[in-house]
Amino acid sequence: MNYIASSGLLFKDGKKRIDYILVYRKSNIQYDKRNTFEKNLRAEGLMLEKEPAVANPDIMFIKIHIPWDTLCKYAERLNIRMPFRKKSYYTDQRSKSMGRVQKYFRRIKKWMSQNPMVLDKSAFPDLEESDCYTGPFSRARIHHFIINNKDTFFSNATRSRIVYHMLQHTKYENGISKVGICKLINNGSYIAAFPPHEGAYKSNQPIKTHGPQNNRHLLYERWARWGMWYKHQPLDLIRLYFGEKIGLYFAWLGWYTGMLIPAAIVGLCVFFYGILTMNASQVSQEICKATEVFMCPLCDKNCSLQRLNESCIYAKVTYLFDNGGTVFFAIFMAIWATVFLEFWKRRRSTLTYTWDLIEWEEEEETLRPQFEAKYYKMERVNPISGKPEPHQPSSDKVTRLLVSISGIFFMISLVITAVFAVVVYRLVVMEQFASFKWNFIKQHWQFATSAAAVCINFVIIMALNLAYEKIAYLLTNLEYPRTESEWENSFALKMFLFQFVNLNSSIFYIAFFLGRFVGHPGKYNKLFNRWRLEECHPSGCLIDLCLQMGVIMFLKQIWNNFMELGYPLIQNWWSRHKIKRGIQDASIPQWENDWNLQPMNIHGLMDEYLEMVLQFGFTTIFVAAFPLAPLLALLNNIIEIRLDAYKFVTQWRRPLPARATDIGIWYGILEGIGILAVITNAFVIAITSDYIPRFVYEYKYGPCASQFEYSESCLTGYVNNSLSFFDLSELGMGKSGYCRYRDYRGPPWSSKPYEFTLQYWHILAARLAFIIVFEHLVFGIKSFIAYLIPDVPKNLYDRIRREKYLVQEMMYEAELEHLQQQRRKSGHPVHHEWP
């Protein structure tokens, strides 16, 4: 209570703490609804006190305090679990004796240097683990609960949840649906409702010598500061201050970031393996030495013959991402995704046990006001509450879903149209870059074309994202979801589909379509009979795919970080500037400072999860083509954790501490991405990279195919074998001789010139076989690993069952003691067991 008093979070009497804040404008004319609502709140047991704003006389704050008796009544009604008195049992003593071995190992660890990533537990004195079991709160058995201080028995998060429950279930007018603070905010009676922060997050005195002023100050110093980037997160304190739902998000984000470390290390090793063996690569050596091999022109008008050795640098860069470790890394990342998700389930079960969420069941949600207003004439009895409520007919629901699905497909087709426009741009501009005045661009016109297209594509992606959010919002409202959770799940799924297709459609084009249907010299396929389709670079298409992924991933992370932190910082700075300009030498109370902060995103944690899930897709789906993706994701997430922490602690109003037991719909989306990643990586290795053609040449057509032992590399002659011949006289350029192009077609002097050779069909069959074998192998390993790893650790499962038994015994003894007291009062003999 000391920090509550010091921060001014009390009523004017200096005794009652402020648990919630309501805000309205005096100029708003709907005072009858407010008066009725506030009168009913007082009748329910809440205490209210009004106070005008210091900076704006039109703003009025209503401070809400919930007394002890009201807290107890609603805690019992909501089945809130609280610490229960614990007795000593033999099994507990036995478990402690078995833990002596663990204590011995702990003593050994003290001789080792302390892990700098671990938080100093002495800085969190209020978060020490308790040996007490919990049980549903009951006023009749209140003496069995550990109540050292009535002011701190219920945490601030619990008090805020109880007050919010009362605000949601209090009427403001006569009528079944005229209930709840959300409806009053929607109709403008109030403009905000939020729990206050626990004071300032900064202090003039150092925390090491004077300690934290409040939990917000402690969170800032030990979590949200950029200097704490290498420390573990204080998840228990995050849960205590922001609630279990936000605590689970940061737990998942921290777990995901930690699991990225081995993926980033292996990806870096694959990359460095490519660097170390790049000069020894037989393919790169042959390309760099091919001074007399001329490649056919890659465009019709301004392109000339190009020596193969001019693409030496591109061949070496391609080898960094397409080498012997590519297949291993793709399999590793597929297994990594499964291990990440399976161990996250174990981590989640541990957290739900630690945070006492095992037996928590989400209470019946209230209906959305839009749903009630639309279907108030059609009622049906709720099977849970037994009360009549608005009902949406099945025919109407199916019709609206079909319209929504049609809208989704229309937006996806719009994405494909945008990608097609970028493809046309590449076809048009490559001729211009090939005849550019600047020598550098003229020599590297393919790289310039790809780089410009990537930047334009990124601008289109960000512009379409803004449109998608509004359209997804309209389509979700068109469905009229029944509850807020249904609305959030539907909106989240649409946003994921839109943004996933928007981000990855151009990557899918480059990976699987670029250079696949160009034809051959003398008979090129043209778009609209005008623009010749774009070919891959002589060193392959993988370099284009790497460039596309790297630029989009890097730029999008920078943009997201700016929008998450930079935009709220600018808005809050402007709010403070207006206050300082309008008032001089005035002390602004804490609740008014909170009012001047930005409210949490209306979609809650949806944007945070969406950003990370899309990043997970980038990290896994095309990781065979870009092994540095886990490293970029790891570096971004280290920043993301502290950025989100800083935003929650300093830039946003305190959100309602909501409860949850999992991450919701996002887990299913992550599993779907993991399955898609196996398929796409199989196709990238088989189709986009040159792994399969090299493999077929090595064992079927190369020097090692006919000789058991060969002194040189088995890929000797691969580059010459992979290039077909074309007669230059057929191009009409006035030149004679032959040029080469990437394909497996017969030479002009063969009986079937420019037809596919037998080697082409061998490679195609090998590609299909690889895809089937790779998918079955990886899916089998994933399923086996998922089977081996239980969702709940065995010792935790036994501990949960044991605690349920102990709580039942304690409840039994409490009832027995109550019955014995009644018998003593009535003069009847006391039995030590049930009569």
Image (cartoon, helix red, strand yellow):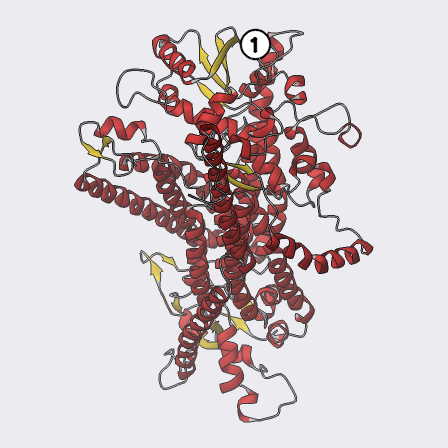
In the displayed structure image, the side of residue 471 where residue 452 appears, left or right: right
| Nearest the eye: 603 or 429 | 603
Q: Which residue is mark 1?
A: 55
Q: How many marks?
A: 1
Q: Give above or below for 752 relative to 405.
A: below
- The quarter of the rendered structure image containing the C terminus is top left
| Nearest the eye: 272 or 237 | 237
| Nearest the eye: 218 or 707 | 218
Whether residue 485 can be seen here: yes
Counting from the top left corner in percent of width and height, residue 257 is at: 59, 50
Q: Give above or below for 651 relative to 96.
A: above
The three-letter amino acid code for the residue at tag 1 is Ala
In the displayed structure image, the side of residue 27 where residue 817 appears, left or right: right
Whether residue 619 can be seen here: no
Q: Give above or below for 262 relative to 581.
A: below
Question: What residue sits 62% from the left and 77% below the top?
Answer: 282
Asked which secondary structure carries label 1, the reply is: loop
Counting from the top left corner in percent of width and height, residue 280 is at: 67, 75
| Nearest the eye: 401 or 537 | 401
